[in-house]
Image (cartoon, coloured by chain):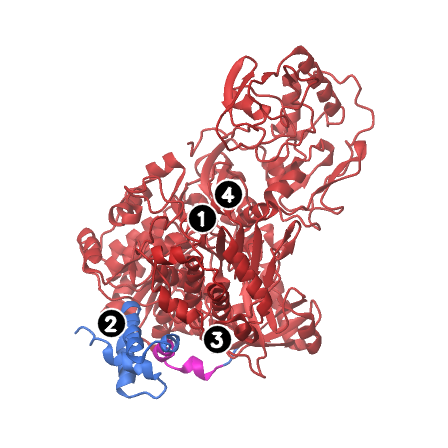
Chain colours: A red, B blue
Amino acid sequence: MTEQTASILIEPDYGTPRVEGEPTAHVTIDGLEIDVAPGTSVMRAAKEAGVDIPKLCATDRLDAFGSCRMCLVEVDGVRGTPASCTTPCTDGMVVHTDSDDVKALRRNVMEMYLSDHPADCAGCARGDCEIQDLAHRVGAAEVRYGLDGANHLHDATDATNPYFAYDPSACIVCSRCVRACNEIQGTFALTVEGRGFDSRITPGGTDFMSSECVSCGACVQACPTSSLTEKSVIELGMPSRTVITTCAYCGVGCSFKAEVQGSGDATRVVRMVPWKDGAANEGHSCVKGRFAYGYASHRDRQLHPMVRDTIDDPWQVVSWEEAITRIATGFRAIQDTYGVGSIGGIASSRCTDEEVYVVQKMVRAAFNNNNIDTCARVCHSPTGYGLNQTFGTSAGTQDFASVDHTDVMLLIGANPTDAHPVFASRMKRRLRAGARIIVADPRRIDLVRSPHVEASHHLPVRPGTNVAFINAMAHTIVTEGLHDEAFLRDRCEDVEAYLSFIARPENSPEETEAETGVPAADLREAARLYAAGPNSAIYYGLGVTEHSQGSTMVMGLANLAMLTGNIGREGVGVNPLRGQNNVQGSCDMGSFPHEFPGYRHVGIDEVRGIYESLWGVTIPAQPGLRIPNMFDSAVAGSFRGLFVHGEDIVQSDPNTQHVEAALRAMDLVVVHDLFLNETSRFATVFLPGTSFLEKDGTFINAERRINRVRPIMPSKVGKDEWQVVCEIATAMGYPMSYANAAEIMDEIAATTPTFAGVSFARLDAEGSMQWPVNDAAPHGTPTMHVEHFVRGRGRLMPTVYVPTTEATTRRFPLVLTTGRILTQYNVGAQTRRTDNSRWHPADVLEIHPSDAELRGIHTGDIVELSSRVGTTSLPALVSDRMPPGVVYTTFHHPITGANVVTTENSDWATNCPEYKVTAVQVRVANAEAARAHQEADAVTLGSGS
Amino acid sequence: MTACVDDREHEPAVIRMGNDIARHLEYLPPETAADQIAAHIERFWEPRMSEELLVHADRNDTTMHPLLLAAARRLRPPPA
């Protein structure tokens, strides 16, 4: 494969999608013979044989449409000139693509296109419009009809979308954009309005910005002319070279072609185009990955190390050497006074595997303790615990492509159309093909009902009651005899105890209905549907993990899959949808305080010995502090220094007051990040970081896929982040150095059995690989637990429902749950610095009409949101997507500070915060609070952050 | 944005966390539950946290779940 080119990488387009099957159809095309699968289009067969038939409306990512009439061919024994894109190959077919008659027809058709195409087409001049090239190719040198007939050359451009423009004068109404929106993205926002000459593409009769368009860019990518063009291309011109890399947003981990101009420090990104060969996304993208990369060059970006004596002093720019010396001296002084365990570090799920690995190594070898934790603590740590207990390893069981074989999806606690949009498009494709979906979520999310998607069941599980719900599902399956006895007998253990537990009456849908809010009859129907499959797959998100019973619930999901034999083949499984780009990787890399890379406990002598021997140090055999433990210890005075890598814990972690008190109590907080953020308000050393466009390394997505991240440009801060970490360790007296990031991966592979076969060279050759990659699976492992579970037999765990202590009261009668929105990402540090904020400039509180009416709240009112730990204010959005009694908000904007109201409650096994359940009250804000909110909002927006 | 306080927030974290574990394992027979709580704490808690828990246990802290108290007695003495 090609990972980096000296020129633009042009991906071949075969015109129509590949057809699976044995190549039993023997076809002759212009004298060339080829065998293809029956049903393959003549156009595709020709391309595979080396014959490029002209086309405009065809592309291999869309079903054939047959409208442009450019691809006409002659077939022996067939009358007329069929379109090669819609004509399937049959055995013995003889095709002529270049006869005089065909050429004349194409010329005539092209003349018609040219008669309504701008003579001064900017796209043709730039080279991103296919019309001019194709006209030359088919020999259409003149337009016999003249250029002054009826045309669309003066139609106005729609430039309302911040990222692309629609120029209807260049549009040939081939419908590729409409079909891309329908078939690839699944939003159905575009249509052809009018008939004949009047037919025009429109985003539903309005402009793009006001439409249902989600700005995924599929239409822009599909457009064969320059009618739909990225504004960056219009502004900067065409790119000159391509680098294949991986998106730094969500856990889907899309592969992109970074198309750039210039080199070295003068490199400029012109556009990010999803890569067709990217196994995670197969050429699709969302508004974040496709367009929202401008933060990397935002004026807020910090490019120099800074220090200050106290958190009240202004920052002073210093040299790297001075900053690193101050860190090393400060951390050692703290340890000298308060002990080895008085400092620690937090690794980032936004950073590469190699960066995370060196951070945990710095903590274990240079700090000489295990006080290393990761932001996965606050999202998917229950996944680690739950899947490890039941299956034996901490990862999803499938690849994304598995969903193409799924018959029934159980989606719980996840909102993929907003948080994992590219995978959501894949789910929707499968649903349009006939699969069914059960949505368990308190909100009526888009996958409950959207164009051409309708859930078979929407089960509005009340926040905090997931375990009661999943037990009722399993109870139904067991008591109605729908479980897979053979699978349980052959593959699982602790079966009888579990069956006995789950069959108890208290787990029945009827008994749990009052608690969960899910009607028993609906739940029973859903359970039967899931059990019937035959291929049923579970997809879940933070609505499962971020509860006081998050780990129990993950085990409940694993139980359900084992109970029905839905593990170990394509189309089934238990699949956590990871939030950040490298949550999986950061966990894999040993960034939990109790585990080395590869999920091996620090107490295992043999494993610890590997690292002690390689690193030349003694490592404690006991776990270190988790993030919340660090905060508690800081407030208590025993934890005094913290290295925070690429996270904004003040904004993202629960109970902001407690986090701030902890940071304020420390002697030295070091923040290593792109921007000054809420956490850096409590730091006295700031180290500038590198964006994904400058990193060299790997990310691992939700399907365990190890993808290369390649530098598009040199580090803007003069150093790689792993290099900075090594220099801190070295300055602390523990020499650490690597020649490059590849060398770090080599060390990971040498010490971690599941990564034994991984290297940058292998990844460059294979494109990507899913761990485990070792002698048994040299090309990786798309599906896990095929013959047996990682732990041997799958373990069924009793999942007793223990209600959260966060109960509603008369004072706090509503339940607040939190989530994300499509255009913003986590704490918004990246997306708030892009035009994505035009869609979502502020967090809002969604509230059911009856709850709103009771409180006199209208959409747009500033409301006060209070819990037992804090109060904040934000605008209200009255919405019947919410059930009565539950309110919802996002946490993308620091002004809202949604985590001011979330509490210290956490998952019993992992301390993952219970973000999804907070008892609150909502009331219209008094005039003073509303004014304060509006003033703060104006300051935030005015700062450009 | 303002903050207020609550009793649970001021409960010692090790007791709050330990009680949460105990509540989730109290479905087990008491001896087994205590064993598993102790094992969980040894596997996932930093030793100073276990030490702090032992201090509370030695005082027979009444806010501790009985199973947590039983588990605390099973915890190995921390290494010298």
Disc 2 secondary structure class: helix
Q: Amino acid at mark 4?
A: Asn
Q: Tell me the residue that label 2 is attached to.
A: A337
- Marks 3 and 1, how far apart at CA: 52 Å
- Marks 4 and 2, how far apart at CA: 51 Å
Q: Chain of mark 4?
A: A
Q: Tell me the residue that label 1 is attached to.
A: A691
Task: Give the farthest residue toward the top.
Answer: A100
Tell me the crowding category of disc 3: few under 14, some 14 to 19, or many 20 or more residues within 10 angstroms, Cα based: some
Tell me the crowding category of disc 1: few under 14, some 14 to 19, or many 20 or more residues within 10 angstroms, Cα based: many
Earlier in the chain: of badge 2 and badge 1, it is 2
Q: Position of residue A20 (x, y in %)?
A: 51, 33
In the foreground, A517 or A498: A498
User: Do discs 2 and 3 belong to a common subunit?
Assistant: yes
Q: Amino acid at mark 2?
A: Thr
Q: Is residue A548 above or below residue A264?
A: below
Q: Is residue A179 above or below residue A817?
A: above
Q: Tell me the residue that label 4 is attached to.
A: A281
